[in-house]
Image (tube, rainbow, N blue to C red):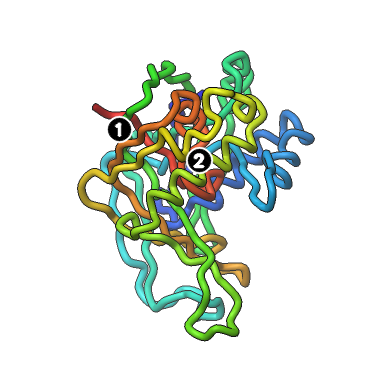
Amino acid sequence: MRFNITLHITSRNRVLPINYQYPLHSWIYKVIESADAQFSRFLHEEGYATGYKNFKLFTFSPLTSKPFKVFQLGGNPLGGIYRGQGPQEQRIGFYGEEVRLQISFLMDQAAEKFIIGLFNGQQFTLGDQISQVSFEVVRIEAQPRPVFSESMRYRCLSPVVLSANRKGKHAERRPHAQYLHPEDSSYAEHFVQHLAEKQKAVPQFADYQATEGWQQTRAVFRLLGKTRKKGVHIKQHTAQHTQVIGYQYDFELTAPIEIHEMAYYAGFGEKNSLGFGIADIFK
């Protein structure tokens, strides 16, 4: 299920850190926990697991509003005491009457009314030590279910993240995760393989006979047009700060219909619950 959520800004301040994905991710977990602490704990600690990978089967879009403005916050606001913090950082101001958000869950359609009731009317605050914005959910609507086919075109609403373990320059160094560029020779293979691993981890998709071995015989990933690199800082201004690199682009995917359904709702690539890998269908 995918939902359009309309937010109203209730605070005087309208400026957020440009890297608001982690606070938004934390709010979504908090809403789920308020209704079902056990389900929230499962999502946070386990997801649907297979092997060494975990999948948390929801994702969300960036916040959108018109007009908005991205600007630089001059100087180093916290004195550079945290790793990875540069001399300037970006903020985003929302100046329209409404702020919109999409949230996508890989859940049964029967849960639609439950999700709407869960989020409708929620009040929350996003931000960091420098600036915060308070919101209220004033409307939530379920999107119609798309008609899926074996070949479909998608446009990324947020960056798709894929990584591979590669050795360092010296042979004795341990392999480390390296983010892949869509034009890397192995990117298409990793894109499809990640979908296959996610399929095996999802109970309602794991046993479909129609999808058995599909990644070797029926899957094609094709990049359409240009790519746009985006680095997102997670837990900025903390000792746990890290940066995730992803890419936004248009693409065509040929795969079984069940795989399209799974990825459309759960997200493409890695780190979906942090707001990566949500895409819209286009023709």
Q: Where residue 231 sits: x, y (%)?
A: 40, 61
What's the residue at 44%, 47% (across, down)? 191
Q: Disc 2 vs disc 1: Cβ atoms closer than 8 Å?
A: no
Query: What residue would you read off at disc 1?
Result: 153
Left or right relative to 212: residue 144: left
Return the x and y of residue 128 as percentages of the image width and height: 53, 59
144 displayed left or right of 172: left
Q: Point out which mark residue 202 bears.
A: none
Residue for point 67% across, 34% down? 32
Which of these two is toward me, 276 or 219?
219
Earlier sequence position, callout 2 versus callout 1: 1
Placement of 232 over or under 10, stated as above or below: below
Q: Quadrant of residue 67?
A: top left
Q: Which residue occupies 48% across, 38% down?
A: 267
Residue 170 sits above or below residue 48 on the image: below
Q: Is residue 170 visible?
A: yes
| Residue 21 image position (x, y, % from top left) | 49, 50
For residue 138, say whether it is visible. no
Q: CA distance from mark 2 to mark 1?
A: 16 Å
Type of amino acid at the residue the image marks with label 1: Arg
- Kindly indicate the quadrant of the structure image that contains residue 41: top right
Taking depth in this image into account, of 6 and 22 the one nearest to the observer is 22
Q: Disc 2 marks which amino acid?
A: Leu
Viewer-nearest residue: 176 or 12: 176
Q: Which residue is mark 2?
A: 195
